[in-house]
Amino acid sequence: MADQPSRGLADVVAASTALSDIDGRAGRLFYRGYDIHELAGGATFEEIAYLLQRGSPPGAGDLAAYREELAKGRSLGALVRENLERVARSQSPMEAMRTFVSLASADDPDKDSNAPDANLRKAARLVAQQPLLVAAYHAARTNSPLVPADPGLATAANFLLQMRGEPATAREAEILDTCLVLHADHTMNASTFAARVCAATLSDMHSAIVAAIGTLRGPLHGGANEQVMLTLAQIRSQSPQDPVAAVAAEVRRRLGRGDKIMGFGHRVYKTEDPRATHLRELAGELAQSSGDETYYRMSRRMEEVVHAEKGLYPNVDFFAATVYHCLKIPTDLFTPVFSMSRMAGWTAHVMEQHADNRLIRPDSEYIGERGLTWTPLGQG
């Protein structure tokens, strides 16, 4: 009897990559050989996007040129502008991101080329445009003017400016920048795999990114951070007098009926997700400075109970929810913010796939009926 296939392709090596690596037992993550603990707070998102897309850390001149390229890329194409309000009224945030990237492809001057230089230009434009698309969507759905981007600001600061309509503090921008670094790539996750499968057919970069965004939309992938916040908010609304105390009973009740507590456990990490280590610290800092530590304290209590009951550690989604909430990002934009960061990794994976391509075509195990006889209609 043939070996049973791995459900969900767990532990199956589907591609080779030089972009990122995980040591799940030790709880370590690397981007092109650099430990995430060195990069978080030690490198900017622009430096990490350059590293992933172009293979090595930028020098000062390289970084300045790349930031200028991103600044020039922060513009909406004609089709996006024409359809912005209609999409904002009719589609949820991640549906809208999928639509906008598809529309943006029509106005990209390199849309018909998969050549390395064209892909590099498209990759930079996609990284530049995604924060603008999120902010423009939010402005359109709230009937608010979109604040123009400031060419002197980096990605994180510009996004907070355009999404909130007013400048962020320097520390707020630094914290969001660190979040973008932490989320930039993560080996062969579901959305990255979807992008590489699409790219392996020699389809274009925008098509591959649309596939990735559609995959990220699922609550078992990028949508988990939103679910974390909704769970915390629900507990707080039900027990406003002491929501921290209510966490333990609610978590045990949900676990007792077989519910999954979002934001915990990871298929790869057997110990704490190294990204969660940084996000926990950032969440605590922001909560303290905001004057309302309720969600942070609830999160720490939930962390304790889930570990005691199930032995599970928080993953990247768990404390990211509190961080984004403290940054005044609407809950339903948490996953689009994730896409802003992961755009750096997705585009790098598309280029890596195109550079050494082979069609990704796994086999499957047939489990249906056999030997049936077809009876044409009218002869039965």
Image: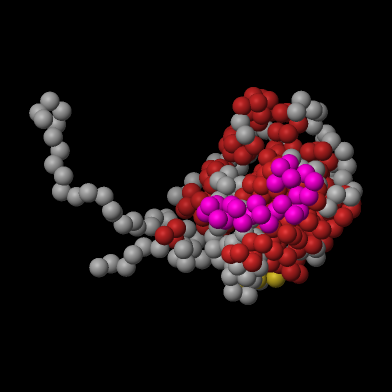
Is 307 placed above or below 127 here? below
Name the residue: 15% across, 38% down. Answer: 374
Magenta residues, start to end = 235-261
Please tell me whether residue 247 belongs to the stretch shown in magenta. Answer: yes
**Does any portion of residue 373 appear in the rendered image?**
yes
Is 76 placed above or below 362 here? above
Name the residue: 62% across, 59% down. Answer: 264
Query: What secondary structure prevails in the magenta region?
Result: helix
Where does residue 39 sit, x and y in percent of width and height?
75, 66
Q: In front: 28, or 340?
A: 28
Name the side, left or right, on which 134 lies relative to 215.
right
Name the residue: 68% across, 57% down. Answer: 248
Is 193 placed above or below 239 here? below
Please tell me whether residue 241 belongs to the stretch shown in magenta. Answer: yes
Where does residue 265 sit, x and y in percent of width and height?
59, 62
Q: Quadrant of the C terminus?
A: top left
Image color mode:
secondary structure
Q: Quadrant of the N terminus?
A: bottom left
Q: In front: 167, or 276?
A: 276
**Does any portion of residue 354 appear in the rendered image?**
no
Name the side, left or right, on which 321 lies relative to 221.
right
